[in-house]
């Protein structure tokens, strides 16, 4: 089995690898341009990558106020590297093993609820409201 390393060093992030996944595999991000993705990664409050032999095989990023609230985004593991617990390791490094411990964390997902429930995520209560991305809002009439 491969030796995987999880790191929050932003200088290790391979923007080409992130772009390759987000632009072709990620149902949640295909509308973004490469410039958008680069701005999001560079402007992230924190990034965590998964690596094998210095090749990036997984990633996640967060935006935050740095005090009490954070949003987890762009969590992925390349298909060839799934099944080794990397998704759990990435999320753990981000929400439970870094400067955001104790924050209120938010995220959107259509297919990974079981992963996030392991970390205490749950469906929001009635105090949460959302203004969806403009592409999914339709016209306001």
Image (spheres, rainbow, N blue to C red):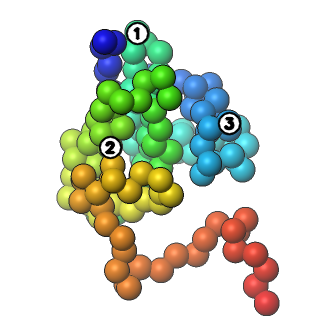
Residue 100: x and y, percent? 27, 51
> Which one is in front in this view, the residue at disc 1 or the one at disc 3?
3
The answer to whether residue 45 shows anywhere in this view is yes
Q: Residue at x 45, y 33 (%)?
A: 77
Nearest the eye: 66 or 134: 134
- Quadrant of res 102: bottom left
- Few, some or many residues within 10 Å of mark 1 (<14, 14–19, 20+): few
Q: Are marks 3 and 2 in contact (CB under 8 Å)?
A: no
**Residue under label 1:** 53
Image quarter for residue 23? top right
Compared to 84, does 116 lie above or below? below
The residue that mark 2 highlights is 91
Question: Which mark is first along the chain, 1 or 2?
Answer: 1
- Residue 70 appearing in the image: no
Q: Is residue 136 above or below residue 39?
A: below
The residue closer to the viewer here, 46 or 22, is 22
Q: Measure how far apart labels 2 and 1 are at the Cα level.
A: 21 Å
* Residue 133 falls left or right of residue 118: right
Does residue 9 lie above or below 60 as drawn? above
Residue 17, horizontal then vertical, whole percent: 58, 26
Residue placed at 37% from the left, 84% from the top? Answer: 127
Q: CA distance from mark 1 to mark 3?
A: 23 Å
Element on which disc 1 rests = loop
Relative to 42, 106 lies left or right: left
Q: What is the residue that sits farthest to the bottom in this orientation?
A: 141
Task: Tell me, for residue 24, which label it has, or none.
Answer: 3
Identify the image quadrant of the C terminus.
Answer: bottom right
Q: Residue at x 61, y 71 (%)?
A: 132
Residue 69 placement: quadrant:
bottom left
Question: Which mark is drawn over residue 30?
Answer: none
Q: Which one is nearer the viewer's eye here, 13 or 6?
A: 6
For the residues bearing labels 1 and 3, Cβ distance under 8 angstroms: no
């Amino acid at each position: 089995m491969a030796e995987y390393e999880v790191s929050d060093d932003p200088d290790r992030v391979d923007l080409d690898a992130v772009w390759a996944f987000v632009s072709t595999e990620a149902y949640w991000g295909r509308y973004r341009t490469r410039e958008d993705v680069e701005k999001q990664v560079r402007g992230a409050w924190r990034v965590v990558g998964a690596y094998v032999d210095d090749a990036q095989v997984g990633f996640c990023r967060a935006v935050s106020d740095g005090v009490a609230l954070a949003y987890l985004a762009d969590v992925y593991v390349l298909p060839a590297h799934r099944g080794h617990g990397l998704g759990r390791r990435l999320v753990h490094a981000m929400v439970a093993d870094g400067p955001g411990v104790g924050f209120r964390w938010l995220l959107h997902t259509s297919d990974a609820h079981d992963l996030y429930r392991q970390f205490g995520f749950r469906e929001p209560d009635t105090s949460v409201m959302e203004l969806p991305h403009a592409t999914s809002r339709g016209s306001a009439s």
